[in-house]
Image: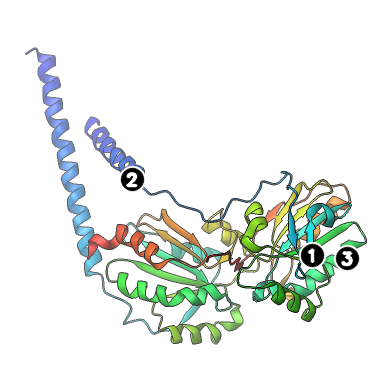
Amino acid sequence: MTHSAKHIHVRLVVGSAVVIVSMLLLTFSAAAQRKTAHKAPNNRAAKPPAQVRAVNAEEMQALLKRDGKRPLLVNYWATWCDPCRDEFPDLVKIDRDYRAKGLDFIAITLDDLSDINTAVPKFLLAMNAKMPVYLLSVADPEPAINMVDSNWSGALPATFLYDNTGKVVYKHFGRVNPGELRAELEKLVGSKQ
Amino acid sequence: MKKLAAISLMITMLAVALLVNARPIVADIPAPPIIGSTISDFTLPDASGAAHTLASLHGKNGTVLIFIATQCPVSNGYNERMEKLAQDFKARGINVVGINANSTESAADVKDHAAKNNLTFTILKDNGNKVADMLGASRTPEAYFLDASNKLLYHGRIDNSRDITQVNSSELRDALEATLSGKPVPKATANAFGCSIKRGGE
């Protein structure tokens, strides 16, 4: 073996070792993440129900940000929207079933600001909803709609599922099919049970 | 440095693998026609069952098609504004036509609703969402402005707020005014929150 061939051989060995170590590190960090997600406190119980906070478009954008840990389900709805009300019990069940498995779920209502202490909490209490709920209060809805999805017309309800990096992995306009949504959730958080 | 490069390559490969693994996102509603495309003629019955074609309804300077509902509070918030739009532009050669594509609202509901809310413009019943699908309509209210040759010039909301006291931009009206003055439409699309059109089978 020539000197340069030996050099290449050493490089290959070192290179392979780096690849193996990186893979191991990634596996361990993923496992650690799963453990954290599994141990994450179930904040349903701690949160008083039916408190709704008004947010503007920038604050809403911040709510959608992910830190690489938990995926996020977002439902846009309003008390005046029939299919929104119809699907809400399914969403409350999904929140109950998946929050402890590592899913964050927020509901964003497009009700009028004047309903924030009346119609909205009344509905949420009746639904026994425990997920954080925000009311988007904007003079012009278009920038907020486009920020969420340029293909969204603003029709309610609309549901978006983001992975832990903030990438949309599933979206649905109109009343959700709970089976279909649960199948998508299983792909994201099902293994973290 | 080469070790760093190897690690970066490794991470990139993993990222690519994850991306390739991602599922396609399925859209349920057909995409709307692009601005500038010509809308084909169609035939729909009104609430009394009489058939109308787009050709028979369009004004000499254009047509406004608005998907409306009898039960949606957003659409209902616009009843007076839609009627006023129809009145204001009738004499100027632009006809306003309502379309109800909700499978949950019958022709009789549409007739009652129009009478109760003094809506005098023609309202068509789009059973089976034929025209809603052709136009990619998804919510109420949702407006389409076609010029004299049925070219789509504007698609979207009527204005920025269902609360008339909060209105500060009227994109649909602006599109009509611009076209009547021979100017380009200033803003060809704009969205707002509204009720989903209840398509058949939902």
**Is A84 placed above or below B33 here?**
below
Q: Is residue B173 left or right of residue B141?
A: right
Residue situated furthest left in the rendering: A1
Does residue B163 appear anywhere in the picture? no
The residue shown at (80%, 73%) is B119
Amino acid residing under circle 2: Asn
Q: Is tag 1's residue or tag 3's residue first in the polypeptide sequence?
A: 1
Depth check, front residue: B104 or B177? B104
Q: Residue at x 55, y 87 (%)?
A: A118
Q: Secondary structure at mark 2?
A: helix
Marks 3/2 same chain: yes
Q: Are marks 1 and 3 on the same chain?
A: yes
Q: Is residue A187 above or below residue A43?
A: above
Q: Quadrant of the N terminus of chain A?
A: top left
Q: Amino acid at mark 3?
A: Asp
User: Where is mark 2, residue-wise?
Assistant: B21
> What whole-number distance in Å separates the C-alpha atoms at marks 2 and 1?
52 Å
Image quarter in which the C terminus of chain A is found: bottom left
Q: Chain of mark 2?
A: B
Q: Could you tell me residue B110's position as x and y percent?
A: 72, 73
Q: Quadrant of residue A145?
A: bottom right
**Residue position for label 1:** B50
Chain at numbered mark 3: B
- The residue depicted at 50 percent of the width and 87 percent of the height is A122
Residue B51 seen from this side = yes
Label 2 packing within 10 angstroms: few (<14), some (14-19), many (20+): few
